[in-house]
Amino acid sequence: MSNTVTNLRNTMQSSPTTTANSSDDVIVALRTVTKSYPLGKTVVHAVRGVSLEIRRGEFSAIAGPSGSGKTTLLNMIGCVDVSTTGDIIVAGQRTNELTDKALTQLRLFKVGFIFQTFNLVPVLTAYQNVEFPLLLQKQHTKAERDAKVRSLMDEVGLSDRLQNRPGELSGGQRQRVAVARALVTEPAIVLADEPTANLDTETGNNIIDLMKRINSQRGTTFIFSTHDPKVIRRADRVVWLEDGKIAETPESLLMGH
Ligand code: ADP
Ligand code: MG
């Protein structure tokens, strides 16, 4: 099956919240994107010509074996890395043309990040970790920040853990704090790189449930990566990567779709 057909099928599988079809609804677009890393005297071709459109409100998985380019792709979508060639458009902005300052603003206001290893600041409390991106935004009063942090911590079920530091929380609780931190700025897009990989199956499922609930309640676009078949099946749409290219999703992984 060609990629076009695969993409069409994937689009048809996308969530019921994704009803509009106009190009205005495309929140992330990649056009023949490549990424190569110099490595000694050789070059690693991590991403080799990926074209992809993600619509507002989708709950998509970038899936594929280890080394297939998932992290590289998410880092470029999240503007923490730049493509070698090809265009990446995020929330209507052509990222290749932006200054470092503009890229930082785009990241800060449009994108939320969730990581495999949670990446919380260990010396800060859960409350302070969630407040952190709001401080960077420099847009809100202390009272506004307080209301946002408490509301998000409530939403992820951790109202009673505001003053705990990450070291005093379980893995699942830490990832919930990370979800709250990613969402507190009300980003258009949340990127989650293997968000369940360091959690047991049940805890990982609860994190996906939480992300899915926020996706349907707020319409936030989620793009998460995973190599776990159980997690892949929770996505409304699967983009399967192999050797830095989009390939047909293995049939066995589409069961349940
Ligand atoms: P995945 O997240 O799917 O496991 P990655 O995007 O991390 O894959 O990596 C894709 C390929 O790019 C791998 O071969 C990896 O070794 C290589 N790679 C990733 N980052 C770098 C880097 N900074 N320097 C050199 N090679 C890299
Ligand atoms: Mg990775």
Image: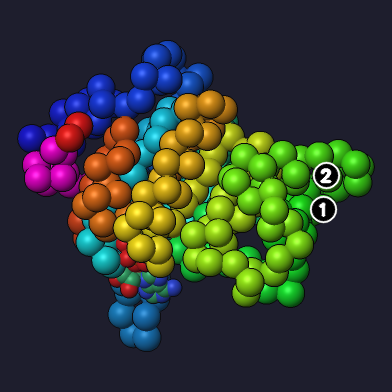
**Could one spot residue 115 in this view of the protein?**
no
Name which quarter of the figure residue 130 lies in. Answer: bottom right
Name which quarter of the figure residue 100 lies in. Answer: bottom right
Compared to residue 42, the image places residue 144 above or below, namely: above
Ligand 1 quadrant in view: bottom left
Question: Mark 1 or mark 2: which is in front?
Answer: 2
> Magenta stretch: residue 167 in it?
no
* Residue nearer the viewer, 232 or 208: 208
Marks 1 and 2, the one that precedes in the sequence: 1
As drawn, the label of residue 147 is none
Tell me what residue is drawn at x 76 percent, y 40 percent: 148
Q: Residue furthest front?
A: 160
> Magenta stretch: residue 253 in it?
yes
Where residue 129 sits in the image (x, y, percent)? 71, 60
Q: Are marks 1 and 2 in contact (CB under 8 Å)?
A: yes
- Image: magenta residue range: 244-255
Considering the image in quadrants, where does the C terminus appear?
top left
Q: Which residue is mark 1?
A: 135
Q: Residue furthest bottom?
A: 40
Q: Which residue is mark 2?
A: 145
